[in-house]
Image (cartoon, grey):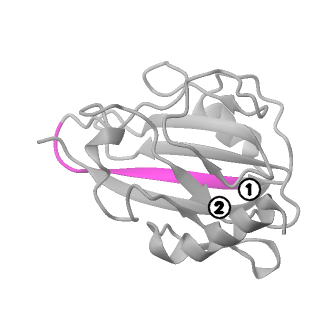
């Protein structure tokens, strides 16, 4: 077996032992799932991935995209922010062969795999971790399998990405973590 096949088998076998995200059905009944080794859905996000820690993106992994998928996009947001939904990460045009993002993704506008990062609500490219002013907030990592490679330049906002994705979503998966400052 090739190394990619072995790694895929290993990843699939580990799925039951990692943080589980919301499963959604894609084309032809395939399940599309987003998970993280850092936290399970509904659990506290470790401070390492927040403004109180290293403020780096967590390792994320997902199942193979359903048939018809041409690209992958991810939005991480906080709907509990006092000023309305706050975007923490916007990344899109991920190749369909991608099944995860490593920890501490650099805030590069364009990545070596051709994917692009958009602006978060701080006006910066890349990931900005949870940093709620008060109370416990929910952070949704929303993963989209798309039937097109979007023609968006690097630096797009989540609003621009959502508009571009309209009519192109094949499947969606979600992982929600919680965070409050001490």
Residue 59's place in the image compared with 117, above or below, is below
Please name the residue shown 61% across and 27% down the image: 118
Number of marks in the rendered image: 2
- On screen, residue 65 versus residue 86, left or right, reads right
Residue 161's place in the image compared with 107, above or below, is below
Q: What residue is shown with label 1?
A: 145
Task: Give the CA distance from mark 2 to mark 1.
Answer: 6 Å
Given contact means CB atoms under 8 Å apart, are the residues at marks 2 and 1 in contact? yes
- On screen, residue 40 versus residue 26, left or right, reads left
Question: Is 135 in the magenta?
Answer: yes
Residue 32 marker: none
> Is residue 32 visible in this depiction of the protein?
no
Residue 182 pos. (x, y %) = 11, 42
- On screen, residue 82 versus residue 25, left or right, reads left
Image quadrant where residue 44 sits: bottom left
Q: Which residues are magenta?
A: 134-144
Q: What residue is shown with label 2?
A: 172
State the predominant SS element of the stretch in magenta. Answer: strand
Question: Is 82 in the magenta?
Answer: no
Q: Residues within 10 Å of mark 1 (few under 14, many from 20)?
A: many
Residue 41's place in the image compared with 99, above or below, is below
In the rendered image, which quarter contains the N terminus?
bottom right
Residue at the farthest left position:
182
Please name the residue shown 56% across and 43% down the image: 102
Q: Secondary structure at mark 1?
A: strand
Q: Residues within 10 Å of mark 2 (few under 14, many from 20)?
A: many
């Amino acid at each position: 077996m090739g190394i990619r096949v072995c790694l895929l088998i290993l990843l699939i076998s580990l799925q039951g032992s990692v943080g589980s995200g919301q499963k959604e059905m894609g084309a032809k009944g395939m399940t599309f799932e987003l998970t993280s080794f850092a936290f399970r859905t509904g659990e506290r996000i470790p401070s390492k991935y927040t403004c109180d820690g290293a403020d780096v993106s967590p390792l994320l992994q997902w199942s193979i995209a359903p048939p018809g998928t041409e690209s992958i996009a991810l939005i991480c947001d906080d709907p509990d922010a006092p000023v309305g939904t706050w975007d923490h990460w916007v990344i899109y045009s991920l190749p369909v062969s991608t099944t995860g993002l490593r920890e501490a993704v650099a805030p590069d506008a364009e990545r070596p795999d051709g994917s692009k990062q958009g602006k978060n609500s701080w006006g910066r490219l890349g990931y900005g971790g949870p940093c709620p002013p008060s109370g416990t907030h929910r952070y949704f990592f929303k993963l989209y399998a798309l039937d097109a490679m979007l023609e968006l330049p690097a630096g797009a906002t989540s609003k621009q990405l959502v508009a571009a994705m309209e009519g192109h979503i094949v499947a969606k998966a979600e992982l929600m973590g919680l965070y409050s400052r001490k």
